[in-house]
Amino acid sequence: MSLENSHLNVQRTLAFRLCTVSSYKTELLEICSDDPKLHVLFIPGNPGIVSFYKDFLESLYEFLGGSASVTAIGHISHTKKNWEHGRLFSLQQQIDHKVDFIEQELKNTGVPIVLVGHSIGSYISIETLRKTPEKVKYCIGLYPFLMLNPLSEKQTDIKKVAESSILSALLSFSMASVGLLPRCASRIIVSNSIGKSWSATAVDAACSHLLRYHTFRNMIFMALTEFRKLSETPDWAFMRENQSKMAFLFGVGDHWGPLEMFDEIAEQVPGIALSIEREGHTHSFCCSEAGSVWVAQYVASLIKNQLLS
């Protein structure tokens, strides 16, 4: 890929906005183009904390040369403040939330919408495309989580925790207790545990959002509903019908989107656009600057080739 020229002279900082979508407080990060040819709506994975993706989103806007407005929408109650008072939200409710956002906020954009989803956000993007086919032009899944992986011990462990209300509460309380410490202390703990290889952006996102009882508890509950839904066979017929509107990027060694899933999609939907990232980035690409830039460049190149050429 060579989009370096597009990366020049269009640097712009993301703006944070809090809006209400179907009565739910929703965190957005957005960059508005002066002359957009399309609108990129980014749907995060789980946790659905948009601030994790700040570096990626800014790079994506730059690589697109300012030709697209970019909006990232967070999941309900994966927020800094406990706006929903501890209520838990399922995968289906998060899907409906994204559809409602398009109907409410992007109804009169006048330009095509491109959905970009990460992990379970890829599944949410497909379902959003299903419900808004007249508005969504293209759908890109990054390191997609579309089916359960029976060989993943990590998924098995997470499922056991998610199925136990006691374990879920204890783990959420443990994370929240770290969040009660002074910010400098919580940063040190995050940087030396889950965030050893993370960027400053990712560490900040974890300290501000992830170390909250309501957020972590919602993350676990959403995972539980993901496991239940993704135990079903994917809707191959729908994917074949819309193969010209879909593309997926897989990663080597990614247990959420293993290469076995890549092979199955290639067999079931032979005309779909599939790629494999072999640069050594991880499923949590947004937690490093290098991963954020590489994936942003990939997405921008795909959008330019498919929609802007």
Image (spheres, grey):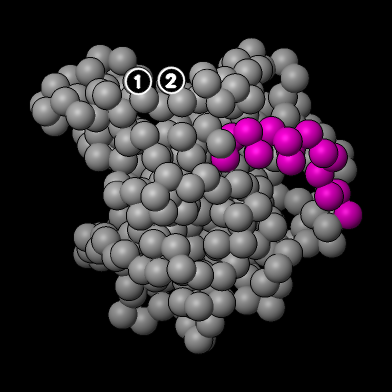
Q: Residue at x 27, y 24 (%)?
A: 177
Whole-angstrom CA distance, mark 2 to mark 1, is 6 Å
Horizontal side of 42 relative to 307 (left or right) equals left
Q: Main secondary structure of the magenta part?
A: helix
Q: Is residue 274 above or below residue 200?
A: below
Q: Residue at x 60, y 47 (%)?
A: 90
Is label 2 in contact with label 1 (beta carbons under 8 Å)? yes
| SS state under label 1 | helix
| Residue ID for mark 2 | 170
| SS state under label 2 | helix
The numbered mark at residue 174 is 1
The residue nearer to you, when weighing 34 against 213, is 213
Task: Answer whether residue 42 is magenta in the image.
Answer: no
User: How far from the left and from the top, in percent, is residue 194?
Assistant: 35, 20
Task: Answer whether residue 236 is magenta in the image.
Answer: yes
Q: Amino acid at mark 1?
A: Ser
The numbered mark at residue 11 is none
Q: Which residues are magenta?
A: 222-237
User: How far from the left and from the top, in percent, is residue 211?
Assistant: 31, 32
Q: Is residue 147 above or below residue 96?
A: above
